[in-house]
Image (cartoon, helix red, strand yellow):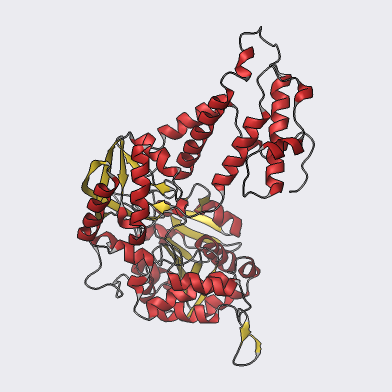
Amino acid sequence: MSELPTGERPLAHLDPYPGEYAESLATNQRGAQNAGEQDEGQGRAQPDAILDGGQYQQFDDRHGDEDDGEAHAGQDNAAGMLCSMPLRDLPSVDALVRSLPATSLPRSLVIECARTAISEAREQISQGKEGDPHAVARRLVEHLHARRPRSVINATGVLLHTNLGRAPLAREAAEAALAAATSYGNVEFDLVTGNRGGRAGYTRELARTLTGADAALVVNNNAAALYLALATLAAGRQVPVSRGELIEIGGSYRLPELMKASGATMVEVGTTNRTHLSDFTAAITDHTALLLKVHTSNYRVVGFTEEVDLAAMVELAHRHEIPLVYDVGSGLLDENVPWLSGPPPPWLADEPGVRQALELGADLVLFSGDKLLGGPQAGILVGRADLIARLAKHPVARAVRCDGPTLAALSATLQMYADGRGTEIPFWAMATISPNELQARLEKLLVGSGAVGEVRAGESVPGAGSVPGATVPSPVLVVQQPSADLLWDRLLMSDLPVIARRETGELVLDLRTVPAHLDEVLTAALQAACRS
């Protein structure tokens, strides 16, 4: 770990003081009534804060148990008197490290925890407060251990759960990524000519074929795709966009800020709830580079509203000989979902398809690889070959390109669509599980766990800022005893942590997002949590 300036504590942020623990925990508990995701407008609380709250609660309890009868002995002394541990008795870093329980964390991290704990204890003691470096160090180590990347059971019913990694990859996509990550590959090498080749040639061909585009380009996420398009086609020029489409995603991505960073000048047209074609017509000048349409994939404006449809915007753009760029975001390849049997499900209504956007004349369409597409994080641009060629040559294209494992996983995912096996992709497999199958699994879970509760009608949600307001009918298990908060904390502490959701004081488990092969593991975890 790199050296820090004198006085800085590298891990201090992991160890708030007791008063801050209580305040943080109270705040987290108030915001944790619904487990799910808030970051992209789905109306659910952020599980990260809830997770931290649960972990902090556990650590506080342990801290309190260990302190009983020890450092609190001096609490009745006069204000300002030092606690029972003099500064000279603080342990050395090495001694504190050796006193900690065995852990699988790297020794360098444990040493940093010990240093931070001693520093904080020294500061506390110097202020006449209680300082226990052993308790602080244990707390820091346990907190770091809990934050390591690990698998969890997603029982929230949010299919594309951003905080939990969105949808899992198809097995063959994951295996393709593993193979690419653990060996050399033809990432930029043409095995036919024996010369250097273009990156992602096979991936781009799959994307082009599946969408009916002239050409395709792949970057590392959809925000990067839009940034690249604006920087290439509109830097130093104007881009009209409806005020009703000035999206924010995740609290850190705002369209106006991204457009400013790209060098383009945003021209807001219309109002939040109503934008007319005449608004765009009036905004076009000699300095206009393109027209931008953005699918509001993480919110809906309802009531007295109007928006300009894509066909009308395409006609206007082409009349003025400028391109129409459409950011559809969520990445539904085809609104007819030909990989599913029967008609498109009702929850996909109003969700634009990439193929249909191109058929209506959009010059460039951008979408995510890790939302409705069900692949790895990526941004995919499809459309006119001349525009794609310009984007590929821009210096930013190299800065936002994908690595080999991501391209391998994306290729495998797109190939499943091309082979007519879209229903095998985990997102679509979960989305199409029948309510009857879920009902049977839930009843077995209820009986096997011995939980006090009942199976009720409920709803799953697509999540990840896609298909806002849409729900997928799903039965759920509502556990009534013990309390939702207590059961939530216990499930988080399972060997394979279980993330559920809380609604109106009850704990809810939705098996739509739980693979069937984990039902026994979930049953055992719920049984243990109910009996603890």
Q: Quadrant of residue 241?
A: bottom left
Residue 364 visible in rendering: no
Q: Residue at x 58, y 41 (%)?
A: 142
Which of these two is toward me, 35 or 400?
35
Q: Residue at horizontal 73%, vertical 36%?
A: 115
Residue 249 visible, this orientation: yes
- Residue 73 vs 297, above or below: the answer is above
Residue 3 position, x and y percent, is 78, 45
Residues 511 and 422: in front is 511
Quadrant in which the C terminus is drawn: top left
The location of residue 355, given as percent across then percent down, is 37, 74
Residue under the image location 61 percent in, 79 percent down: 185
Viewer-closest of 331 and 177? 177
- Which image quarter: residue 485? top left
Residue, far bottom: 193
Q: Is residue 57 above or below residue 349?
A: above
Between 260 and 118, the residue placed more toward the observer is 118
Note whether 304 is above or below 187 in the view shown. Answer: above
Give the x, y percent position of residue 374: 41, 66
Vertical order, 473 against 362 (above or below)? above
Would you say 370 lies left or right of 421 here? right
Q: Is residue 254 left or right of residue 101?
A: left
Residue 147 spot, x, y in % from top left: 55, 47
